[in-house]
Amino acid sequence: MHEPIEAAWAACKPAADFASLRIVRTRSDDVTVRKGVVEPPRFGDDLGGMVTVIDGGGLGYAATADLSPSGIAAAVARATDWARASAARSIVDYSSIDLGHPTGTYRTPVVEEPASVGLRERIDLVRAQADRLKTDDRIVDWYATLWTVDVDSLYLTNDGGRVEQRLLHLAPGLAVVATDGSDTQQRTLGGRGHCLQGGLEQLAGSGFFTEAPRIAEQVLQLLCAPNCPSGSMDIVLSPDQMMLQIHESIGHPLELDRILGDERNYAGTSFVTQDMFGTYRYGSDLLDVTYDPSRPHQYASYGFDDDGTTAQREFIIEKGLLLRPLGGAVSQARAGMEGVANSRATSWNRPPIDRMANLNVEPGTSSFDDLIGGVERGVYMETNVSWSIDDSRNKFQFGCEYGRVIEGGKLGHVVRKPNYRGVSATFWRSLSGVGDGSTLQVLGTPFCGKGEPNQVIRVGHASPVCRFSNIDVFGGV
């Protein structure tokens, strides 16, 4: 496929300050077995290209599903027209931004290709886990699912840049719902947070083959459990809840285009301002946060972002101090700040914008027992189930599927519907314990929405278990 596209691009690339062609092919395969019934498998195959042109200070885009020489040439002409039309009207001099002309390749490390396993075998693999969830008559709904997304991309520039990438994503899921009278409870495999990159060999470490009995047992425990206690107390959050906490109260507030005001109409703004970087105390000394799209099997790993910037690990917050925003090349130039390689698009028919990729809390030195042992009164919480946060990504309220009280440094009985609330600007300063590497999990989510028109993108979050002191906790209804 690439040779004729590269030949067409060479023949029609514009004489402009900068131009690029980004080709993306996305193939997906989703198998689900629910209540013993195989749902119709879902398959997708999507292919197209986006032309970007910068000329005379203006910027133009044009997407096309027609990748013939004439189709690419027509997209180049439309993008060039838009760039020249916007040149005198843009608030940004795009010609001053050096997007570069990178060369390189990146491929997700894969041992067992999902495509090498037949559909019947994949269905049997999923069915085997679904069947393990129905352990009691009170369980009224249960399913297992395996979703794979295979993304091939080619990025070409008008001055010899060429980047080829292949990313293979796996999203396994387990879920069970139990009912007793008017009470209904659910338990999932990390809220479908055990997403990763790689071949089928990666499923062994995701919990997909081992966790069905545990979540089936826990959903029945929740039916008999009291409500979570309320009051100011310590909380200990598992990695599958930390994932949501990182995402909403660090990731979104630090997106540079949001800080610059681009998202105000749709997804809100941020409590973070440009003058806070380098001086602002975001969290306690225990908080170290890295942006790491280079981690091989994490869900949003890549070698280059969609503007061709080389991906590399950077500290976003170090020892609690806010260092740099999540901003790609264009936002960095607009703000005059260093950022990261996070200019990303959901598909070929969307321009890249500032997005999270792998945003991780680095492990500390405490064992799980140390974290629990340091709590006189509190709640341990697992697996996000609900979230609410204001449009400046500051005040929040989060709920979890499963909790256990902590009394005198020991885990106690199970509680249902544990919730907590806080303010991003102060919450992370209450971080009083960070788990070591033995508590860390590498997780991710397929569904992060942002942008106009909307873009839904894959994000990775790795985190150890973490403890926070004097948090407002309450039970759900």
Image: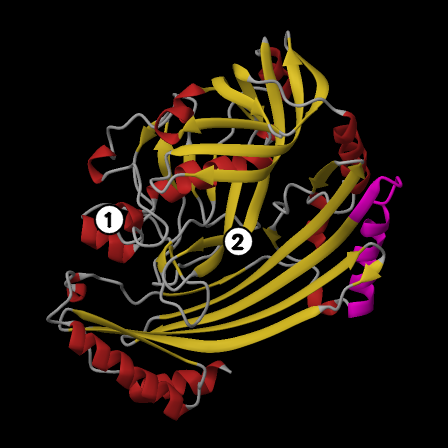
Residue 145, image quadrant: bottom right
Residue sitting at 66 percent across and 58 percent down? 199
**Dot 2 crowding, Cα within 10 Å, few <14, some 14–19, many 20+:** few
Residue sitting at 63 percent across and 56 percent down? 170
Total marks in image: 2
Question: Is residue 368 at least partly visible in the picture?
Answer: yes
Q: For mark 1, what is the residue?
A: 260
- In the image, 293 versus 149, the foreground residue is 149
Q: Which mark is residue 447?
A: 2
Q: What amino acid does circle 1 point to?
A: Leu
Image quadrant containing the C terminus: top right
Find the magenta span and give its range.
118-141
Q: How is the image coloured?
A: secondary structure
Q: Position of residue 151 (x, y in %)?
A: 54, 67
Query: In terms of sequence position, does the residue under pointer 2 or pointer 1 come before the other?
Result: 1
Up the image or down, 105 lies above or below 234; here it is below
- Horizontal placement of 256 versus 221: left or right? left
Question: Is residue 433 at least partly visible in the picture?
Answer: no
Q: What amino acid does circle 2 point to?
A: Phe
Residue sitting at 20 percent across and 54 percent down? 333
